[in-house]
Structures are given as C-alpha cells and as structure tokens.
Amino acid sequence: MHQRLYVNVDHVATIRQARRTDEPDPVAAAALCEEAGADGITAHLREDRRHMQDADIESLARSVRTVFNLEIANTAAMVGLALRLHPFQVTLVPERREEVTTEGGLDVTRDPAGLASSIERLRGAGIRVSLFIDPDATRVRASHALGAHAIELHTGTYAHHPGDGPALAALRDASRIGAGLGLAVHAGHGLTVRNVGPVAAIPEVEELNIGHHLVSRAVFAGLGAAVREMRGAMDAARP
C-alpha cells in the first residue's frame, strides 16, 4: 500500500510572519511540494494566527491540487470555517496559547458530546474527519465511538526517544487497534528523515503529516529536494 505523505506548510508562514511581509508564501510552497510528490497539503489555522492566516487558508482551499487537510481546534468558529471552505479532511487538534507547538494529543474523553456534534456536522457536509490523539488504546477506542473516520497518532514522544522502545511500541499497538476498529491510521509530529523509518514501517499507518523538518531541510537543500528525500525514506521503510 502506498503510504501518503502530507506536507504541513505552517512553518513557511512562520518565517514570513517573523517580518510580517509577503514572503515566503505558503501557498506557493504547497504547489512546490505537490510537484515534488506530496500526496496532500496540511495547514493549521491556530486561533492566535501565529503562522497561517485566514487568507492563506482561503487560498490553499482553492489552489491545492491534491487534497487539503485543515487542522483546527474544536471551536464553533473553526468548524464553521471548515464547513464553508469544505477541505477534503479536517483534523481536530488541541490548542493552548502558551505552547510553542502542539505538545500532545486531543483529549477525546473531555466534552465528548461537543466533539461528537462537531464530527457529525463535518461528516454531514461530506468532510473526512481525523482526530489527533496520543497513541493510547482508550483514546483510539473513544475516537471510533465518536464517529471519526481516522486518527492521527502523535509521534512526539517517539521523536524525542527514537528507536525500538516503549514509544514505538505504543504507536504500533495503537495503530493495530485503530485499524482493527476500521479507522484509518495517520501519524505525525517531530518526524525527520532520520527517525521516520520505524513509523513508516508500521503497516497500518496510511499517512504521515510532516512539516517542520521539511521546512528546516529546505533551507539547505530546497523544498522540492526535502520532500523527495522524505518520500524516499518512507518508501525504503515499507515492507
């Protein structure tokens, strides 16, 4: 099975926002990623607008030629935006203003009724729904019960402790449980060409979302080359 690579272009916008100018353009970056072989484009519109701006998301929704995965918090305003723009997929993620980046998975056991309502609205509009969660059996099963199409397993703990240890075992177990329930299994956060192999090798993982490393690597090698390097590392790890 071809494992999909979705490139997150948030940190192209991070560089732009450092100067509040018009470059580099994350929409142009998305097009380059697609040309280099990305299967989809991911972008997170945070409530504090620290990187992606509304105009970026509007443009991406119109211009992405593969598929667009919109990451948002579960708020009425964000769900309303998703319903208006109708991306291929919405990934619901946690948000805290004080964090530098997303530091863990969504607590799907908190306010399940509200979460289920948002999922139902998005599904009713024909939008695929994924939940960004920690690799934990309870959260995997709760995501299924809430009606999500997919889960994205948070790989941050593994990224800080790569190798064949407990963090990787948790990802393997959660992937197996999710797939057994009929969920599509995605993964992402902190993945690089150096540590992606063991995660890419998990047979149930259909899709990886990778951003910061690719933008960092692009400083030295160019964005297209960075995407192709990652694609090669993923393919080499698949059985």
Image (spheres, grey):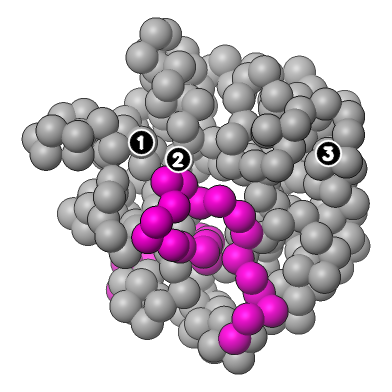
Q: Which residues are magenta?
A: 83-111
Q: Which mark is residue 152?
A: none
Question: Quadrant location of the C terminus?
Answer: top right
Is the residue under label 2 in contact with that under label 3 (CB below 8 Å)?
no
Name the chief secondary structure element in magenta: loop
Question: Quadrant location of the N terminus?
Answer: top right
* Other-residue count near label 1 (Cα within 10 Å), few / some / many at <14 / 14–19 / ≥20: many
* Other-residue count near label 2 (Cα within 10 Å), few / some / many at <14 / 14–19 / ≥20: many
Q: Which mark is residue 8?
A: 2
The residue under the point 84% across, 55% down is: 174
Q: Amino acid at mark 1?
A: His
Can you identify the residue that label 1 sits on? 11
Q: Quadrant of residue 19?
A: top left
Q: CA distance from mark 3 to mark 2?
A: 22 Å
Looking at the image, which is closer to me, 163 or 79? 163
Which of pointers 3 and 2 lies earlier in the amino acid sequence? Answer: 2
